[in-house]
Image (cartoon, rainbow, N blue to C red):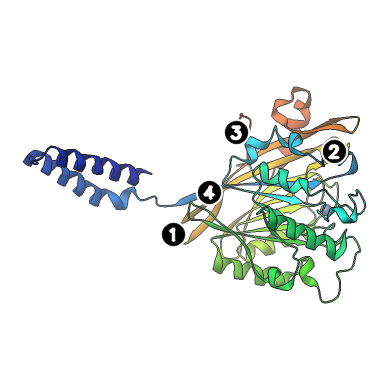
Amino acid sequence: MKIKAIFVALAGLVILTACSGGVPKQQTEAVQAVQQNIVELEPKEMPASQSISITAIGDVLLHSSIYYDAKTKKGYDFDPMFQDVKPYLDSTILTVANQESIMGGEELGVSTYPTFNSPDEIGNTLKDVGVDVVTMANNHTLDQGEAGVKHAAAQYEKIDMAYTGAYANKEDSEKLTIEKTAEGISVAFLSYTYGTNGIAVPKGKDYLVNLIDKQKIKDDISRAKQQADAVIVSLHFGVEYEDDPNKEQKELAQFAADQGATAVLGCHPHVLQPVEWLTGKEGNRTLVIYSLGNFIAAQEETDRRIGAAFQFDIEKDGKTVTAKSPRMLLTYLSFTDWKHYRIQPMYQLPEMKSDYEAKKKHMAKLAPDLSFIETEVSS
Ligand SMILES: [Zn+2]
């Protein structure tokens, strides 16, 4: 920005002197001085590093009461449920969501637990609130079989939403999902799940869902590092309703850190689990959140209604790329009689004060530098 402003100012000066006919010596000297200054200033004024901001949200899991609540005459409208948090999701350069209940297509019939099938309209809402990438590898990926994955992939392509972790064919599964930003930082998104609720992956069709497989994760991260500046690994793992990561989650996050992942985003427990910085074997620092919790799911317990918009920066300084400044908006899903669903910034709810303070403490217990977003963001 600074460099551009100097050039504009100089261009103005040249035009001014040109219009005045003969160029007085004094002015010529002034122009030369400015030019010299630019030459001298340029290396110093060039930004030493680039930076982008990222938001990650957890499970978008649409139980029946949520889609009944969104029902309109023509179809479904999930937009109002996200409106209070939209400015926060939209405020970063990139936003990634775990779309857990697959958009399997209307022909298969909309359905709830245990085999979900969500209306296509949820994709449009996510797009509208600023989501750029959805992670698709989770235990519900095969709820609607091969047809479900194919429909979801086609639908995301139709609305120009990037997706990762589940693919319609082998060829697509071999392409990495890389978001290139105007700021000059590219980010690869990888996504894997521990399993698919006992639904077998059709033989010879491994591309339908990425399962957690260390060799595959290692190969994918190494390939992603060659094609992108930063690598974000989403892992669908852990034990449901546990507030803290288990040994396996810790070990897998460390494995991803050792391969050079910039950040690890955990999902599946339906409750939040803490943030932690890990050091990879090359001395790299990897930002981890063990579970992003539910962002929207019809589960009544307080902990399952608390979610997060987890934000951080990715800074590129020469060849070094690191995550920085972890921060979080805690959210709360309010509803009455399984209706009027609304995701709200938790700091704005005085009645939730004690739960809010306890959750803040829990989330930052392994990462004291984690801060909390408690101010309004204009959309
Ligand atoms: Zn799950």
Q: Earlier in the sequence, mark 4 or mark 3?
A: 4
Image mark for residue 379: 3
Report the amino acid beneath label 4: Ile
Mark 4–mark 1 distance (CA, rounded to whole Å): 15 Å
Q: Nearer the viewer, residue 302 or 134?
A: 134
Would residue 187 be found to the left or right of residue 20 on screen? right
Q: Nearer the N terminus, badge 2 or badge 1?
A: 2
* Disc 2 target residue: 71
At label 1, which amino acid type do we have?
A: Gly
Number of labelled discs?
Answer: 4
Name the residue carrying label 4.
52
Q: Give whichever of 88, 150 is nearer the camera.
A: 150
> Which of disc 3 and disc 1 is earlier in sequence?
1
Q: Residue at x 83, y 40 (%)?
A: 304
Dot 4 or dot 1: first in sequence order is 4
- Quadrant in which residue 218 is drawn: bottom right
Element type at marker 4? strand
- The quadrant of the image that shows the N terminus is top left
